[in-house]
Image (cartoon, grey):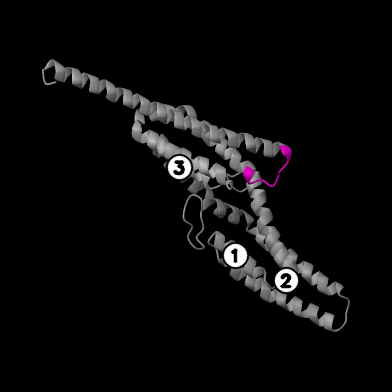
Amino acid sequence: MGWFTKRSKSWEVKNTVLLLGVVGSVSFISFGVLTPIAIAIFGNIVNVNRWFWKSCMIALVYLLFLILALFFLVADVSSTYVLAVNFLSFYIYVVYMSLDLGEYLQRLDLQNYITLEKNKDYNYDAVISQFNQVQEDISPKDRFIAKLTFWRDQISNAKVVENVSELIRLTEIIIAKDESRADLFFVRHGSTIENVLQQYVELDQTYIANASVISTKENLEHVIAQSKVVFENELSNMIETEALQVDGEASVYISVLKGRGIL
């Protein structure tokens, strides 16, 4: 669990570095002129535009410092003043977005569960609690499919995404074949597969890429691939059992017809 959300700390660090890194870099490179545009892009991701308008107000005040710096430059005063103003823009905007960092991360996570309304405030803990309650009310099979779909959408590796999509397809077929048998199957495999996918996503979204992390991810990819084989075998067994039942019923039916002299 992270500092602001229910997601991992590595997920929060990654998105924090992305947000503040882009805002700070654009501020420094463009002397703060293009920073409101960068902030508008991130605000649009989480459906908030008030950050853009506030950054425009900051930009107007900062413009006065920029004009003053250019005046010093034209007057052939030391370029240190210009550099100082440049660092000032970097500092102001990074601090400004840091104040809204918690809300940004929470809204970024919430959009995986609900459709965010423009500028509407949300109680993060309440929304997550309600979502979990709804999840508890649905059947284990539907919840399992929802979990697989959720984690699949967080994965970037195309092969893993393909394997998880196949797991979802096989799950739906298994449920359609025999719901009572499917219940026992999900009890045996459901929580394990969910934990594997969650761990894989957390590793996949971290900036750490040392040998240990890479090795662990490869092992988890292998487990996911083998899970697909397990699901395929389970479906094959169900089809064979169904075929045997049909053969048995057909044999009895034929025997009855022969006994009545119809055949």
Which structural element holds mark 2? loop
Residue 259 placed where, x, y %?
14, 15
Q: Of the residues shown, which amino acid type is indicated by label 2?
A: Ser
Q: Residues within 10 Å of mark 2 (few under 14, many from 20)?
A: few
Q: Give the range drawn in magenta.
A: 204-211
Report how far apart the C-alphas of labels 2 and 1 lie in the structure: 16 Å
Predominant secondary structure, magenta span: loop
Q: Of the residues shown, which amino acid type is indicated by label 1?
A: Ile
Mark earlier in primary sequence (3, 2): 2
Residue 72 in the figure: left or right of residue 99: right
Q: Which of 172 and 100 is in front in this view?
A: 172
Residue at mark 3: 146
Residue at mark 1: 41
Mark earlier in primary sequence (2, 1): 2
Residue at mark 2: 30
Mark earlier in primary sequence (1, 3): 1
Q: How crowded is mark 1: few (under 14 residues within 10 Å), some or many (20 or more)?
A: some
Residue 89 placed where, x, y %?
74, 68
Determine contact: label 2, label 1, CB under 8 Å: no
On-image quarter of the C terminus: top left
Classify residue 134 by image quadrant. top left
